[in-house]
Amino acid sequence: MTKTFVLDIKRISFILIALLLSVSAMAQYRSLDQYRFELGVTGGSSFYIGDANPVRPFHRAEVAVGALARYNITPRYTLKAAVTRGEVGGDTRDFGNKYPQDKQLSFHHSFWDMGLNIEFNFMDYGLPPYAHGYRWFSPYIFVGAGLTSFKDEYNNPRMEFNIPWGAGVKFKLWKRYNAGVEWSMHSLFTDDFDSAELSNPYQFKGISSIKNNDKYSIARVFFSIDIFKRKHCRY
């Protein structure tokens, strides 16, 4: 038996043991979760980042409201679906930027955002107070995929993909009631969310579309209630 083969066996054994421990820990976590789902409402503000507002957070911020649903996979991992109705606006004159032919443009959009995110809690969250590892709050980060529905300047309906990512903090207020604050950035795959005339207005060649694409951000608070208690929990 060669030394290389022995090393490979050891590596494979280590990986298998690590996987088994991970599955065991996840199973234990699943049994400790008190409730499977959360339903809640959200409220806050939305703003746009793009050619008509390149740098300033919360510039021309508008109201954003919505609803969310969470499926608690473990106390560390949560799958969240959210629907938000918001508004964004911008005006090129706010920053004194010079555009070709001295054009100055403004816009205002209402939009719907629908997203599915995976959240990672930095602390065990959602356990009953008497369970080992219980925490009444936890910061978290998330990333996912989403759709943005809006009407352009010609009143044509549009649907665009976006990548949402961000962070937040959640709190257990009392038994089944949760609250939290969250900030998210939604990176679109288009540069004409504001206006077709602001899509690469300088006509740069070879410009990075990812860097130049429009974005919008949502800062919000949420309140939710836990539903559907897990059966056969071991505490």
Image (cartoon, rainbow, N blue to C red):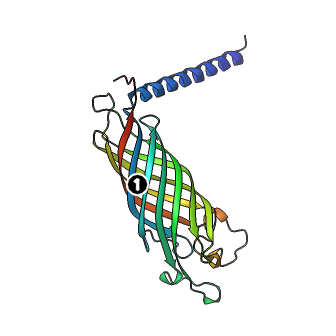
Q: Is residue 211 left or right of residue 130?
A: right
Q: What amino acid is found at the position of numbered circle 1 in the picture?
A: Glu
Q: Nearer the viewer, residue 209 or 193?
A: 193
Q: Nearer the viewer, residue 211 or 232?
A: 232
In percent of width and height, residue 59 lies at: 44, 73
What residue is shown at x 60% (from left), y 87% (from top)? 103
The quarter holding residue 38 reads top left
Quarter of the figure with the C terminus: top left
What residue is shown at x 66% (from left), y 79% (from top)? 202
Quarter of the figure with the N terminus: top right
Q: Is residue 178 left or right of residue 15?
A: left
Q: Secondary structure at mark 1?
A: strand
Residue 124 can be seen, yes or no: no
Vertical placement of residue 182 versus 111, above or below = above
Residue 189 can be seen, yes or no: yes
How busy is the neighbourhood of tag 1: few (under 14 within 10 Å), some, or many (20 plus)? some
Vertical placement of residue 160 versus 98, above or below = above
Residue bearing the label numbered 1: 182
In percent of width and height, residue 167 lies at: 44, 52
In percent of width and height, residue 2 lies at: 73, 13
